[in-house]
Amino acid sequence: MFDRVQAILAKQLRKDPAIITPDAQIKRDLGADSIDILQLLMRIEDQYGIVIPDESLATFVTVGDVVAYLEEQERRLNK
């Protein structure tokens, strides 16, 4: 899951994947602005076939937060 999110972020933000770690803060460390984040979420929603509610979006600070959310959604779907 991390690898997929890392690849999406690297492409979206034009960053070297090596600097995109689970602990990297999306805004501070990777330089994403609100438009970048919106585009990222649309891409993730399309790829995973989910809708990310605004209240969940507000909890995403690090790349790991996004990965943890997606893993939780995947667990719920596979039950």
Image (spheres, rainbow, N blue to C red):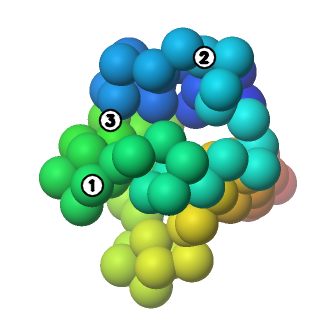
* Along the viewing direction, whichever of 15 and 43 lies nearer the viewer: 15
Foreground mark, 2 or 3, reads 2
Q: Is residue 74 above or below residue 14?
A: below
User: Going by the image, does 41 lie left or right of 1?
Assistant: left
**Which residue is label 3 attached to?**
43
Q: Residues within 10 Å of mark 2 (few under 14, many from 20)?
A: some
Task: Looking at the image, tell me whether mark 1 or mark 2 is earlier in sequence order.
Answer: 2
Q: Amino acid at mark 1?
A: Asp
Of the numbered discs 2 and 3, the one sitting upstream in the chain is 2
Q: The residue tagged with tag 3: helix, strand or loop?
A: helix
Image spot of residue 25 (x, y percent)? 60, 55
Judge whether residue 34 can be spotted in this image. yes
The residue that appears at 69% across and 17% down in the rendered structure is 18
Image coordinates of residue 44 in percent, x first then y, are 42, 39
Residue visible at 38% across and 59% down in the picture: 51
How much space separates mark 1 and mark 2, taking CA atoms?
18 Å
Identified at 26% across, 45% down, the residue is 36
Residue 66 seen from this side: no
Quarter of the image with the N terminus is top right
Q: Amino acid at mark 3?
A: Arg
User: Height in image: 5 above or below 79?
Assistant: above
Image point 42% across, 64% down: which residue?
52
| Residue 78 placement (x, y as % from top left) | 76, 46
Under mark 2, the amino acid is Pro
Seen in the image, is 29 located left or right of residue 36?
Answer: right
Which mark lies nearer to you, 3 or 1? 1
Estimate how packed mark 1 is, as few (under 14), some (14 to 19) or many (20 or more) residues with alpha carbons within 10 Å: few
Q: Judge by depth and name the residue closer to the eye, 77 or 58.
A: 58
Q: Which residue is mark 2?
A: 17
Name the residue that disc number 1 marks: 33
Q: Secondary structure at mark 2?
A: helix
